[in-house]
Amino acid sequence: MRHGDNPHRVNRIGWLRAGVLGANDGIVSTAALIVGIAAASTDRHGIILAGTAALVAGAMSMAAGEYVSVSSQADTEKADLELEKRHLADDPAAELEELAGIWRDRGLSAGLALEVAKEFTAKDALAAHARDELGLSDEFVARPVQAAVTSALTFSAGAALPLAAALLAPPQAIILAVSVASLLFLAGLGAVGAALGGAPRLKASVRVAFWGAVALGATALVGRLFGAAV
Ligand SMILES: [Zn+2]
């Protein structure tokens, strides 16, 4: 985390962002698939089966993607820490001056900055450099498994919504029910995400619902074209 940020809000956005994105993806991709198939076929069983497959496949793909991306972030953080450890061992005086410089930049006087740097260095030099120089803090250490599980769960939760709408709707109204329900959920999710992150709600809702509608329209069109052609 960079200094000056509100740690609580930033931290919350990190988790929130992952959760909202996962749920968003789940809603959009599953709803779009259901609408596309429903536009081509009236086979209710096939529609539900495809929606269920989309949920499972999407959750797995999200988990794998997130695992890979967060793992490489973790590798980068580890390499940065190793480098910092070497610098501290090779040239402790320069590292102390570097840390004091960071505190001077944050507004402390030269004497106090040096005092602060000395005390942090005596306590845990690596932790001080990780935090103040690299911007890494304990709560920000990349956790690949946690990230993978979170994405898979939030994607599944999102995907379950259009699937439930398809299950509950009468067969001839699946497209309408799934589209309306999904756009409402997307708009709601956009508003919640914006509110918790401190951003304008209406703008976020409209944006996310608009792109959801574009996705649904596109697959419905594909479904119509292929359904008519096959
Ligand atoms: Zn350093």
Image (cartoon, grey):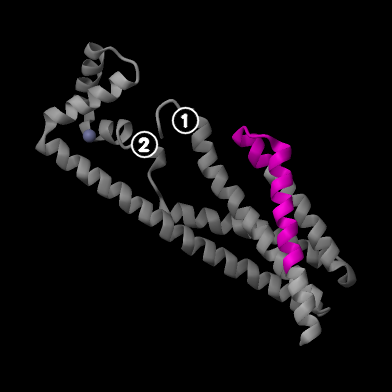
Q: Are marks 1 and 2 in contact (CB under 8 Å)?
A: yes
| Amino acid type, mark 1 | Pro
Can residue 86 be seen? Answer: yes
Can residue 45 be seen? Answer: no
Which residue, given by chain and number where applicable, does mark 2 sit on? 137
Q: Nearer the viewer, residue 124 or 188?
A: 188
Task: Decide if residue 25 is on the left or right side of residue 172.
Answer: left
Judge the density around disc 1: few (<14), some (14-19), many (≥20) Cα neighbours within 10 Å.
few
Which residue, given by chain and number where applicable, does mark 1 sit on? 7
Judge the density around disc 2: few (<14), some (14-19), many (≥20) Cα neighbours within 10 Å.
some
Regarding mark 1 in the picture, which secondary structure is present there?
Answer: helix
Q: CA distance from mark 1 to mark 2?
A: 10 Å
Q: Position of residue 211 (x, y in %)?
A: 70, 54
Quadrant of ligand 1: it is: top left
| Residue range (magenta) | 191-218
Q: Position of residue 39 (x, y in %)?
A: 80, 74
Regarding mark 2 in the picture, which secondary structure is present there?
Answer: loop
Task: Decide if residue 139 is on the left or right side of residue 153.
Answer: left
Q: Residue at x 75, y 81 (%)?
A: 226
Q: Position of residue 128 (x, y in %)?
A: 27, 30
Q: Point out the image quarter for the C terminus.
A: bottom right
- Outermost residue, left side: 90
In the depicted structure, whether residue 132 falls above or below residue 210: above
Task: Decide if residue 123 is on the left or right side of residue 221.
Answer: left
Q: Is residue 216 magenta?
A: yes
